[in-house]
Amino acid sequence: MMIAILLASPQVTVGLANGVNEIDQRTTYVIKAVNHETTPLAANVRITFPPGLRKVEAAGASVGETHASWLVTMPPGESTYEVSGVMRGDPGSAVAATACVYAGDLSRALVCSTDIDEIPDPQVTPGAGVLTALVVLLVLTSAATASYLMTRSRRCVGVLVP
C-alpha cells in the first residue's frame, strides 16, 4: 500500500544555490524547481531564510519574517524563483537556507534542498602588524638620531678651534 502512495506523488525536484560559499552582505538565492510531470502542478514553493537575512526581496512571493513562498501552478519543466537580502550574522558561523516544494499539504514537502554558507571573518590585511612595527621603528630611529645630532651640535658650540 505504501508503494502506491509513493508512486502517486508528483515527480518534482528542487535545487537551491546562491553561487557562493561565504555570504558577505547582499546575497541572492536561486530556487530551481522542476515539474517532471506532463501536467501542471498546484504547488507552494517555499524558502526558509537563514537567521540574520534582512531587507528581503522576492518578486511574486508572500514574504514573512522567516520565509518566502510562492503559490503557483508549476508548468511541466523548470521554474525559477529568486530571493535576495542582506546577511547579518556572527563572523565564522554557518547559516543555511532551505527550499521546499509542497503540493497541497504544508506538513509534508515533496522535496527540499538546502544551501549552507559561512559568514566570513572580518578582513585582515596580511602583514599589517609587521608594517606597523616598521613604521614605529622608523619613527623611533628618526627621533633618536635627531636627539643625538642636537646634543652633539650643542657640545661643539663651546669648543675653540685653533
Image (tube, rainbow, N blue to C red):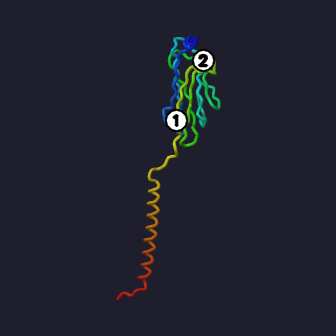
Q: Name the element at disc 2.
A: loop
CA gap between label 2 and label 1 equals: 28 Å
Task: State the residue lying farthest toward the left.
Answer: 162
Q: Please report whichever mark, 2 or 1, sits nearer to the chain's N-terminal start.
A: 2
Spot occupied by residue 37 in the image (x, y as percentages of width and height): 52, 13
Residue at 58%, 40% (x, y): give it. Answer: 89
Say if 126 sits above or below 45 in the image: below
x 59%, y 21%: residue: 109
User: In the rendered image, which residue does mark 2 sit on?
Assistant: 103
Left or right of residue 105, residue 115 in this image: left
Q: Which residue is mark 1?
A: 117
User: Which of the two residues, 99 or 70, is positioned nearer the viewer here?
Assistant: 99
Q: What is the x, y in percent for residue 98?
A: 56, 28
Residue kind at label 1, given as amino acid type: Asp
Residue 88: where, in percent of width, then height?
58, 40
Q: Are marks 2 and 1 in contact (CB under 8 Å)?
A: no
Amino acid type at mark 2? Ala
